[in-house]
């Protein structure tokens, strides 16, 4: 099965439909996106250029089975189609975050959250199943200060 995102004129994904691969075959019997787009236009009354093929197996710029990643991410309702970068983008989580093309994901302007220390990680893990964790350390994004803030979320 092939998957196609139906997008608006503003490039917002409205829905995703499946299409039998046989409905994408050109005259030479080769799968072709434009044939699928024409098929969808005919059967769904939506312009062909607003149907964009997407891969169910692609997320974060990686194909889950080790194949070639296709268009960054599997399109989801509310995602945005970026024709220039050939990527489906999820909703931007924070105003300050920027596109990271290699991973087809949003990143903070200062990079990833710091790694928890060994002590913080140990405190997140109970000593045994009958002993609660002492803290639930985690980094959360602070948009106001554009910083990663450590929270202890005491159990």
Image: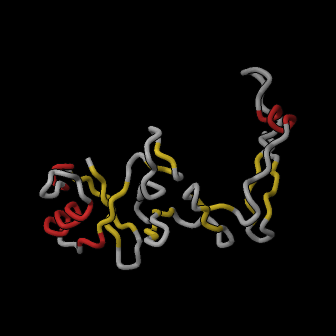
Of residue 137 and residue 43, the one placed in the foreground of this image is 43
In the rendered image, residue 11, in percent from the top left (x then y), is placed at: 40, 74
Which image quadrant is residue 52 in? bottom left
In the displayed structure, would residue 147 be above or below residue 115? below
Q: Residue furthest right?
A: 119
Reply above or below: 61 against 81. Answer: above
The C terminus - image quarter: top right
Picture quadrant of residue 100:
bottom right
Q: Residue at x 77, y 67 (%)?
A: 146
Foreground pick, 7 / 155: 7
Q: Is residue 66 depicted above or below 30 in this figure?
A: above
Residue 66 at x, y percent in the picture = 47, 39
Q: Nearer the viewer, residue 50 or 30?
A: 30
Residue ID at (45%, 50%)? 69
Q: Residue furthest front?
A: 28
**122 left or right of 32 in image:** right
Residue 42: percent from left, percent from top: 14, 68
Q: Say left or right for 4 vs 44.
A: right
Compared across the picture, whether 103 is left or right of 7 comes to right
């Amino acid at each position: 099965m092939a998957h196609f995102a139906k997008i608006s004129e503003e490039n917002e994904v409205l829905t995703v439909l499946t299409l039998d691969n046989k409905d994408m075959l050109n005259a030479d019997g080769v799968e072709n996106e434009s044939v699928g787009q024409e098929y969808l236009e005919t059967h769904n009354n939506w312009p062909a250029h607003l149907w964009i093929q997407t891969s169910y197996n692609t997320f974060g710029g990686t194909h889950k089975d080790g194949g070639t990643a296709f268009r960054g991410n599997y399109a989801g309702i509310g995602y945005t189609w970026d024709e220039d970068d050939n990527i489906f983008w999820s909703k931007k989580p924070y105003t300050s975050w920027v596109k990271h093309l290699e991973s087809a994901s949003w990143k903070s302007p200062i990079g990833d959250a710091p790694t928890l220390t060994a002590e913080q990680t140990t405190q997140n893990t109970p000593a045994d199943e009958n002993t609660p964790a002492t803290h639930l350390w985690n980094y959360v994004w602070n948009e106001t200060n554009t910083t990663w803030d450590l929270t202890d979320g005491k159990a």
